[in-house]
Image: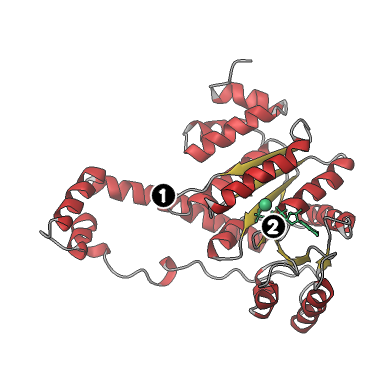
Amino acid sequence: MPRADSPEELAREIVRGEARAIGRALTWIEAGDPRAAALSALLPDHHVTFRLGLTGAPGVGKSSLVAALIDELRRQGERVAVLAVDPTSPISGGALLGDRVRMARHAEDPLVFIRSLASRTGVGGIAASTDEAADLLARAGFPIVLIETVGVGQLEMEIVEEADEVWLLLSPESGDAMQLLKGGVAEKVDRLVLNKSDRPGADRLQQLAEEMAHDRGGLVPMATSCETGEGIAELAELLRKRAADSLSAPDRERQVRRIRRRIRRRAERVWIAAGFARAGGEEQLERLAGEVDRGETDLAAAVLQLTGPRSTGPMTGEWAAEPPCPKENDG
Ligand SMILES: Nc1nc2c(ncn2[C@@H]2O[C@H](COP(=O)(O)OP(=O)(O)OP(=O)(O)O)[C@@H](O)[C@H]2O)c(=O)[nH]1
Ligand SMILES: [Mg+2]
């Protein structure tokens, strides 16, 4: 079959549910291809999608849990898409490849779509292509999009903040689970999932997580095992319930915060590109780099030449960081 090259053709194939067409659209998004915007405008936008961000340390069992959730959901006839976002390649690049193999049993399944998003550079690059990718999947008619990302740092939180809800996985095997709990990471997410409940130390972790949840008014952590299947059906049920809840009573405040971030990120990209071009672009950069290298000028003066005197202040206030995202509670 020839590959669709126009947004119109691709839109038709996506509406028919063709996975290859969806994959191609995501490639356009990742590459910043302008056809992505044209395509998006051609697709229906009446679908309501619940985006669940799943994050946690390497090896905690995110992909295993995603695969288990997929099994549960599709058994109920639910369509589900997965975006595995990898901000920290090259190490987890291999792991993602492994995931592909592990999830290969869903490869021919029209109810399931799985895609790894490569890491990007640039301002909000990863998060930007993740949210656009999730939008595309929403327009392609997936009612649930799972976003898996490795780690618990700033960047990962930026990615999962695009989700309607964020679940953090901990396991008794990842040594820093206790530290993370004590360090207040639970407050930054919507729910804790204690995976590998079949492993030694699981009871202890559960006890601590429950104490923390009790003390700080958080939600009861869920215990799961991808090995024994404990808690998987319950977690899938919870996911479906949360998806239904968010459909009937969307969290407007969170939505506005997200829209705000998205507008800003897109504007920032335009500003940076425009400012860079105005300053002379790569050619000017190359020239300045040469001058600094030969000792004819220093870094600060080179930056000043590129940006002009008004824009060289320190990154402060609004620009230094997004305001923290307060944790929401669904009671
Ligand atoms: N005993 C046990 N092993 C598990 C469980 N869940 C996952 N594993 C194993 O833990 C290892 C890592 O699982 P993954 O699902 O790849 O973990 P991940 O969090 O996706 O890892 P990265 O993507 O590399 O961050 C694999 O060998 C899994 O088989 C569980 O509940 N119990
Ligand atoms: Mg994984």
Q: Is residue 32 above or below residue 159?
A: above
Towards the viewer: 67 or 244: 67
In the drawing, does residue 168 fall left or right of residue 206?
left
Q: Which residue is mark 1?
A: 269
Helix, strand or loop status at disc 2:
strand
- What residue do we see at 60% from left, 47% from top? 94
Of the residues shown, which amino acid type is indicated by label 2?
A: Leu
Q: Is residue 319 visible?
A: yes
Q: Which dot marks residue 149?
A: none
Q: Which mark is in front, 2 or 1? A: 2
Q: Earlier in the sequence, mark 2 or mark 1?
A: 2
Q: Secondary structure at mark 1?
A: helix
Estimate how packed mark 2 is, as few (under 14), some (14 to 19) or many (20 or more) residues with alpha carbons within 10 Å: many
At 22% from the left and 55% from the top, the residue drawn is 306
Q: Residue at x 53, y 55 (%)?
A: 88
Q: Where residue 250 appears, x then y in whole percent?
A: 73, 57
The quadrant of the picture occupied by the N terminus is: top right
**96 w.r.t. 196: above or below:** above
Q: Quadrant of the C terminus?
A: bottom right
Q: Which mark is residue 54?
A: 2
The residue positioned farthest toward the top in the image shown: 1
Check disc 1: other Cα within 10 Å, few if <14, some if 14-19, many if 20+: some
Which residue in the rendered view is the most extreme toward the left?
296
Q: Amino acid at mark 1?
A: Arg
Measured from the top left, where is residue 100 in percent x and y?
68, 41
Query: Quick check: marks 2 and 1 in contact, CB under 8 Å?
Result: no
Which residue appears at 63% of the width and 47% of the height? 96
User: On the rendered structure, is 11 left or right of 37?
Assistant: right
